[in-house]
Amino acid sequence: MELNLILAALATYVLNIPFGFVRQAFKKYSLMWFISIHAPIPFVVLFRHLFGLGFELYTYPIMLTAFFLGQLTGKKIRIYFDSKKLQQEAEITYTDD
């Protein structure tokens, strides 16, 4: 059971990285921002079913942590790529002068 919980949490984490990446592009509390957070929830429920976890209380903290860490990781990746893009644009602008 513990291995299944770890695998389900890992799958939840990996699934949420692209959703966190996309979420960062939208205005906070907008419709698309809201959808980016809530769209992976049916997949998390599917993971719980596929890995035979059920809905025991002890699994919630681990799964919620994996969910939000995946969102946070995707957000940080987006911020990193956006800053690199801005830095490259600034270097191009600076060398053009």
Image: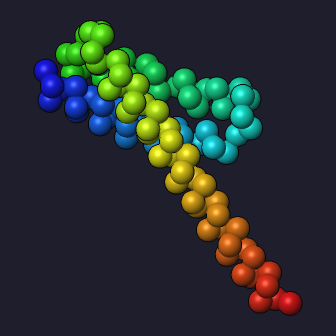
Q: Quadrant of the N terminus?
A: top left
Q: In which quarter of the image is the C terminus?
A: bottom right
Indicate the quadrant where residue 25 lies: top right
Tell me where residue 53 appears, x and y as whole percent.
23, 16
In terms of depth relative to the viewer, which is nearer, 51 or 3?
Answer: 3
Q: Is residue 23 left or right of residue 10?
A: right
- Tell me, what colour scheme is on the image? rainbow
Q: Is residue 45 left or right of residue 22?
A: left
Most distant residue in the right direction = 97
Residue 10 in sight: yes
Residue at position x 64%, y 64% in the image: 83
Residue at position x 22%, y 25% in the image: 5
On screen, 6 above or below 56?
A: below
Indicate the quadrant where residue 9 lies: top left
Residue at position x 82%, y 88% in the image: 96
On screen, 8 above or below 59?
A: below
Tell me where residue 45 appears, x and y as whole percent.
36, 17
Residue 18 in sight: no
Indicate the quadrant where residue 38 lies: top right
In terms of depth relative to the viewer, which is nearer, 66 or 34?
Answer: 66
Q: In this view, does 9 lie to the left or right of 28?
A: left
Tell me where residue 68 appears, x and y as whole percent.
46, 33
Residue at position x 50%, y 41% in the image: 72
Marker count (numbered): 0
In terms of depth relative to the viewer, which is nearer, 49 or 53?
Answer: 53
